[in-house]
Image (tube, grey):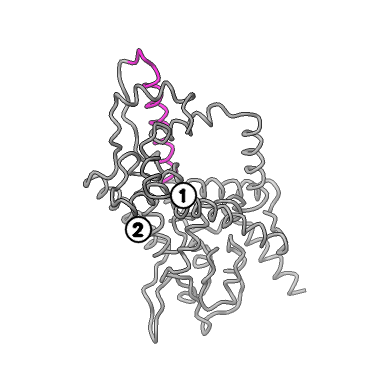
Amino acid sequence: MNIKKEKKSRLKLRNQDQAPLERRVVQLLFGLITLLIGIQFIRFVNSYADPNAALLVHRPAGVEAFLPISALVALKSWLYTGIFDIIHPAGLVILLLAMALSLLFKRSFCSWICPIGTLSEGLAILGRKLWGRNFVLPRWLDYPLRSLKYILLSFFLVFILILMDGPSAYGFLQTPYNMIADVKMLDFFKNLTVTGMTVIAVLALLSVVIQNFWCRYLCPYGALMSLLSIFSPWKIRRNGDTCISCQKCTAVCPNQLKVAEAKAIWSPECSGCLNCVKSCPVKGTLEFSLPSSGGKGLAFDPKRTAIVLILVWFMVVGLAKFTGHWETSIPPEMYKVLIPQAEQLNH
């Protein structure tokens, strides 16, 4: 009877939103910033697409966060030529910053900052409201599906970082297609085909039913962060001496990791969300910390993690702006020519 009650208790806990309040605040902050960037970018495109526009709207450089392929090509070009991309510099800065955060603090970019991750979590919460739970795929299906995001990542890494030579990468960055890749992206969503709408609807529905479906199975960007996060010195660490084996940490893990059975979480699936740290009833038993020997390592609770991530993000972006590595070098006159021709431009 006690076993049944314990299982029901764990299921109830798993179906609740166990995210630290600090993480929700950070997610909302970056979600709002993304929304404002999107509105500003639409106004920018419309002002340049209209030949009679009296006022040209400034382009928000942050939109380049949604050009990961261009950023990866820019990384290849930079490594080969030593020249930092001047077409979409903010995209390369954001890619490098996300990679650095993953190397330091696990996949904190995915669980704290990425707006797609936030949207995915929101859809999962909706699913719990509708059906009282999110469904978990059996292991025989979960493991093969998880490999898909690494297969997609491998395709991009091999094609861009290995097969594409330096001059070709640099040349691609200067093409008209790449110059307005952000505009092409907007056009894609403005002119969605039935196929496109169906794919998005299916992914949204799957994210409602299965928590973090896109992030867990299909996101190549997240796959890159996962691989880098293996080398992160900060990890979820469990003190076996004070652990009471309540299993709450395992129950609230969105990535289905057996936190209660590990001394430290090395899995690339750990996103550093700190749900487990928040749920632990014994202070100091679960910590997001550096390795320690005979004493406590430097631990980050949700509040400290939120502060560090926000400070690091905005300091790096501020430094990029100060050093001229944020705004594009494309002049307004070029946008006046290219944006009206966006639909006709193909790489």
Residue under the image location 32 percent in, 26 percent down: 334
> Would residue 267 be found to the left or right of residue 36 on screen?
right
Question: Residue 102: image x %, image y %?
Answer: 43, 61
Count neighbours of disc 2 (C-alpha within 10 A) and say few if under 14, some if 14 to 19, many if 20 or more.
Answer: some
Q: Are marks 1 and 2 in contact (CB under 8 Å)?
A: no
Q: Return the disc, 1 or 2, that comes first in the chain's sequence.
A: 1
Q: Which mark is residue 114?
A: 1
Region rendered in magenta: 29-53
Q: Nearer the viewer, residue 236 or 318?
A: 318
Residue under the image location 37 percent in, 49 percent down: 166
Q: Nearer the viewer, residue 88 or 299?
A: 88
> Would residue 34 be found to the left or right of residue 80 on screen?
right
Question: Residue 31: image x %, image y %?
Answer: 45, 43
Residue 37 on the magenta span:
yes
Q: Which residue ends up furthest to the right in the rendered image?
A: 1
Q: Amino acid at mark 2?
A: Ile
Q: Amino acid at mark 1?
A: Cys
| Residue carrying label 2 | 307
Question: Residue 180: image x %, image y %?
Answer: 40, 32
Q: For residue 35, what is the image quadrant?
A: top left
Q: For residue 56, what is the image quadrant?
A: top left
Residue under the image location 46 percent in, 64 percent down: 229
> Would residue 12 be found to the left or right of residue 279 on screen?
right
